[in-house]
């Protein structure tokens, strides 16, 4: 198994541009989570999906952030327009429904200049 | 809502020593999972050990063991015979089973193993 796959690994963009982060969960995992990690705020849950349905998006900072999961093997997190304060590492994780094990991707380091 | 607290922002020990990282949590649920994750400079989140709340026996994985005190809502990690490769950020996390089934993290403890 290739694990949770995130792309890109690094992203540098200019303020105001649209940014799309991608995640492929482990096959058979039915829950998917998006986290943001910063020095100031630590690991924050942005949104999570269960069986492709968004369950809790209370962590999404504002309307500039949106997430989708069109099928069981793909999810996107979009920021439009991006701002320098969005600079962070964004992690995607999926969960095994049988043993509640969480597996994290390698993260995307986003820098907005 | 569940909360996880790690009261030690940084710790430092000598190689081969034993070190214990503290974690407390708050929940009204009776069954859940607790985890310790390691994050080295590569930023990869690596599962170190997990504990199921309904199991009284403390989990162990080689040099890593936990002290799970359910009534006190305490979940500490002990690293025996520490190695230079153990240098990393360590995060304690709570995973719900009923209700909000999300992984909630503590603030992390930066552990440095000195040669």
Image: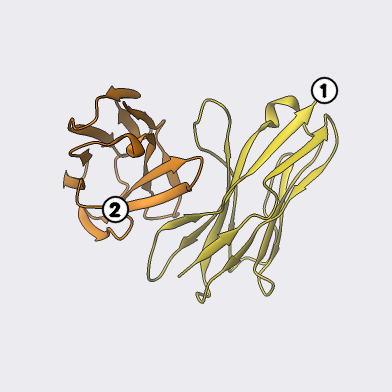
Total marks drawn?
A: 2
Residue B97: where, in percent of width, then height?
43, 65
Categorize mark 2 by other alpha carbons within 10 Å: few (<14), some (14-19), many (20+): some
Dividing the picture into quarters, in which one does residue A54 lie? bottom left
Residue A105: where, in percent of width, then height?
39, 34
Q: Is residue A16 visible in this depiction of the protein?
A: yes
Observer-nearest of A76 and A85:
A85
Instruction: Determine whether, in the image, residue A7 is placed left or right of residue B4.
Output: left
Q: Identify the residue position indicated by label 2 in the image.
A: A60
Q: Identify the residue position indicated by label 1 in the image.
A: B115
Observer-nearest of A4 and A92:
A92
Dividing the picture into quarters, in which one does residue A113 lie? top left
Residue B45: where, in percent of width, then height?
50, 37
Figure quadrant of the C terminus of chain B: top right
Looking at the image, which residue is at 30% across and 39% down? Answer: A25
Instruction: Determine whether, in the image, residue A82 is placed left or right of residue B57.
Output: left
Residue B23 position (above or below residue B26) = above
Residue A2: where, in percent of width, then height?
36, 28
Mark 1 lies on a secondary structure that is loop
Residue B75 position (above or below residue B65) = below
Looking at the image, which residue is at 32% across and 47% down? Answer: A29
Chain B: give its colour.
yellow
Marks 2/1: CA distance? 42 Å
Chain orange in the figure, letter:
A
Residue A58 position (above or below residue A13) = below
Looking at the image, which residue is at 53% across and 60% down? Answer: B33
Q: Is residue A1 visible in this depiction of the protein?
A: no
Chain containing mark 2: A
Looking at the image, which residue is at 44% across and 47% down? Answer: A102
């Amino acid at each position: 198994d290739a694990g949770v796959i995130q792309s890109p690994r690094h992203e540098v963009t200019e303020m105001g541009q649209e940014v799309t982060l991608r995640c492929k969960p482990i096959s058979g995992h039915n829950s998917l989570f998006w986290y943001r990690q910063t020095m100031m705020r630590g690991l924050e849950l942005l949104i999570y999906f269960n069986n492709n349905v968004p369950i809790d998006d209370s962590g999404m900072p504002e309307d500039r952030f949106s997430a989708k999961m069109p099928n069981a093997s793909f999810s996107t997190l979009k920021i439009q327009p991006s701002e320098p304060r969005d600079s962070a590492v964004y992690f995607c994780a999926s969960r095994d429904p049988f043993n509640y094990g969480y597996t994290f991707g390698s993260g995307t380091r986003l820098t907005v200049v | 809502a569940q909360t996880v607290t790690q009261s030690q922002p940084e710790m430092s020990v000598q190689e081969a020593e034993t070190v214990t990282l503290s974690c407390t949590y708050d929940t009204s649920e009776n069954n859940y999972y607790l985890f310790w994750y390691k994050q080295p400079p590569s930023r990869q989140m690596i599962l170190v050990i997990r504990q199921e709340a309904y199991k009284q026996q403390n989990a162990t994985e080689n040099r890593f063991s936990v002290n799970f005190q359910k009534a006190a809502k305490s979940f500490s990690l002990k690293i025996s015979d520490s190695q230079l490769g153990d240098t990393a950020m360590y995060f304690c996390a709570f995973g719900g089973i009923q209700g909000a089934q999300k992984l909630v993290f503590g603030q992390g403890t930066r552990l440095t193993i000195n040669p």
